[in-house]
Amino acid sequence: MRKLVLALTLVLSVFALTACQNEDTAQGVTEDTVKVGNTVATSGALAFVGTPFKAGMDAYFDMVNADGGVAGRTIEYIQYDDQFDSAQGLTYTQQLVEDDEVFALVGHFGTPTVTATLDYLEEVGIPTTYYATGASALFNPDAEGGELASFPVQPIYDAEGEVMLARAIGDLEAENVGVIYSNDDAGRGMLFGIQNRANELGMALASTIQVDPTSDDMSTAAQTMLASNAEVIIIAANQVPAATAIRALDAAGNTAPIITSYVNADATWLDGIKSVLPNFDVYASAWINIFAENGVDFSDDYVTFTENIDAEYAANAYAFAGWIAAATFVEGLERVGEEPLTWDSYIEAMESAPVELPFGVVVDYANGRRVGTQAMAFLKGTVTDDVAAWENEQPIQTIEEILGE
């Protein structure tokens, strides 16, 4: 009976929301404003990610509003703190859509919340622009119906797994690669991509070892991995479990280079494992690349970012991501322009041509393609005078370019 009530509630909510959308109006839109929102972990264990991410979004929207908004509308941004908890994330997402009546979700944050809300959002059909996760469920090359309202930007974990293995082979010249992966959506998604690419190359992995993402003791996994004699070890996990696995490998005496996920390609995360860097190299993928051969590339995008963001976030990758999330949404608004702003017109605008974003990121949503960006750079962790930083090893490249295909 409870499931029936929940199903009927969702159907009624969707009917009510759909009724609010017609040729000329959409919820959250007035002559002067357009309302958007998200739920971002700005407290708890992932606050070091969520807080700068929100700061990047705030800075971009503030810049746009200071310039008069888009088509005469300023952007009203509502944010709730779900503490990286899926139940809270679902509650706040429904509140944003049904009570706050936002026009769109922008910067939908974190694997737990995204996976808990994806079915609901697709059923409603509300535009959801940029997901702060690479959850495998977002990968959809043939979207239809409510799926068309989904606009992922970040690399999907499955695609990143393929890139990780390509880097191990193409850049680090490894023939024997091991994988430690977290038993969650992120780890399993990356592992799927790694195995898929390995199968295409006819390559056997040295070892694949599963770990609990909440565990603070991965010593057994580390020792098992070292016994496999892997020349390169891929850590397919997000921030906390990846750091735990790397410390365990260090304690076990590892000297093999490590490749980890793009979600860890920030100096804040690197600072937490900098003690291992004298013992072995740590690399990360990166889909945002502001580096040049002589350090930071002071492009117009980067100058604009630093002029508008708080100084403490000027080199923070998560703030870059928030900035790009907001820029993605605004690109759709600008394409709609003075025409009526509805969910349908926004979706049509986003599909009309490839979306070119700050820092050289390009995503193509044409013909229902919803797969995020699939080209990535390669960074190496360094420590100088006890300060951890990422240095650019390779520019943004496709898998084919990495493997020399």
Image (cartoon, rainbow, N blue to C red):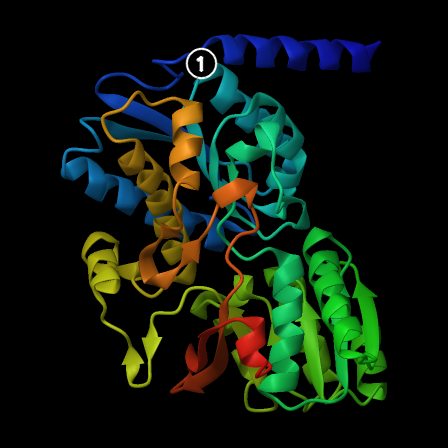
Residue 165 vertical position relative to residue 339 in the rendered view, above or below = below
Q: In this view of the protein, which residue sits in the foreground, 57 or 128?
A: 128
Residue beneath the point at 32% across and 57% down:
358
Left or right: 66, with 391 as reference point: left
Most foreground residue, 125 or 318? 125
* Residue lying furthest left: 67
Depth order, front residue of 14/56: 14
The quadrant of the rendering that contains the C terminus is: bottom right
Q: What element carries label 1?
A: loop
Q: In this view, does 245 lie above or below 172?
A: above
**Residue 73 percent coordinates (x, y):** 22, 26
Residue 41 seen? no
Residue 268: x and y in percent read 45, 66
Identify the residue shown where x is 83% and y is 80%: 204
Residue tagged 1? 21
Q: In this view, does 179 lie to the left or right of 327?
A: right
> Quarter of the image holding residue 196?
bottom right
Please tell me how crowded label 1 is: few (under 14), some (14-19), or many (20+) other residues with Cα within 10 Å: some
57 versus 5 height, above or below: below
The spot of residue 250 in percent (x, y) is: 68, 83
Work out whether residue 276 can be spotted: yes
How far across and how far down the image is residue 276, in percent?
59, 83
Quarter of the figure that contains the N terminus: top right
144 on left or right of 80: right
Q: Which residue is drawn at 60% across and 91% down?
A: 279
User: Where is residue 218, by image quadrant?
Assistant: bottom right
Q: Give whichever of 283, 368 is nearer the camera.
A: 368
